[in-house]
Amino acid sequence: QVQLVESGGGSVQAGGSLRLSCAASVNSYKMYCMAWFRQAPGKEREGVASLYFDGDDTYYSDSVKGRFTISQGNAKSTLSLEMDSLKEEDTGTYYCAASPYRSCRSWLWDDTVYDYWGQGRPVTVSS
């Protein structure tokens, strides 16, 4: 059983920065994709950043491109999300997710591709 445990996040004023981390109970080499999703109040969950391990490729949604950075730790069992220039619309609960399927690269923002999820961390950006 894979477990994902998130930490970090919190509250910040617009323009500030926050960092999220995700520790996996298994080496992430067994996962083809790891990603960060978020869910704002009253909205559907959406993918914001993903890492595909076969080529160490990174992907970002248009809403966060240039402001967020996804990265993997040296132990390959940790995933981080550095969030800069935060906006009020970035507010929500952020989830770490992992997919064991090679095909995840074609479905990066489809949350049904990800079998494993963290418990979620709140991020609040105020004006």
Image: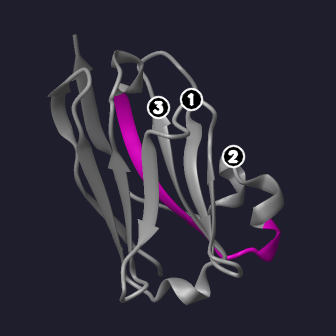
Q: Secondary structure at mark 3?
A: strand
Q: Does 45 appear above or below 19?
A: above
Displayed quadrant of residue 85? top left
Q: Are marks 1 and 3 in contact (CB under 8 Å)?
A: no
Taking the image as shown, residue 127 lies to the left or right of residue 74, namely: left
Q: Does 5 appear above or below 94?
A: below
**Which residue: 63% across, 78% down?**
53
Residue 50 image position (x, y, % from top left): 59, 57
The magenta span reads 92-103
Residue tagged 3:
39
Q: Decide: few, some or many residues near mark 3? Use Cα within 10 Å; few <14, some 14-19, many ≥20.
A: some
Instruction: Say if the magenta span includes residue 73.
Output: no
Residue 104 image position (x, y, % from top left): 75, 64
Outermost residue, front direction? 66
Residue 114 image position (x, y, % from top left): 63, 60
Residue 79 image position (x, y, % from top left): 40, 68
Q: Nearer the viewer, mark 1 or mark 3?
A: 1
Residue tagged 1:
63
Q: Earlier in the sequence, mark 1 or mark 2?
A: 1
Prevailing secondary structure of the magenta residues = strand
Q: Earlier in the sequence, mark 1 or mark 3?
A: 3
Q: CA distance from mark 1 to mark 2?
A: 13 Å
**Which residue: 56% across, 29% down?**
63
Q: Quadrant of the C terminus?
A: top left
Q: Amino acid at mark 2?
A: Trp
Taking the image as shown, residue 126 lies to the left or right of residue 119, namely: left
Q: Amino acid at mark 3?
A: Gln
Residue tagged 2:
109
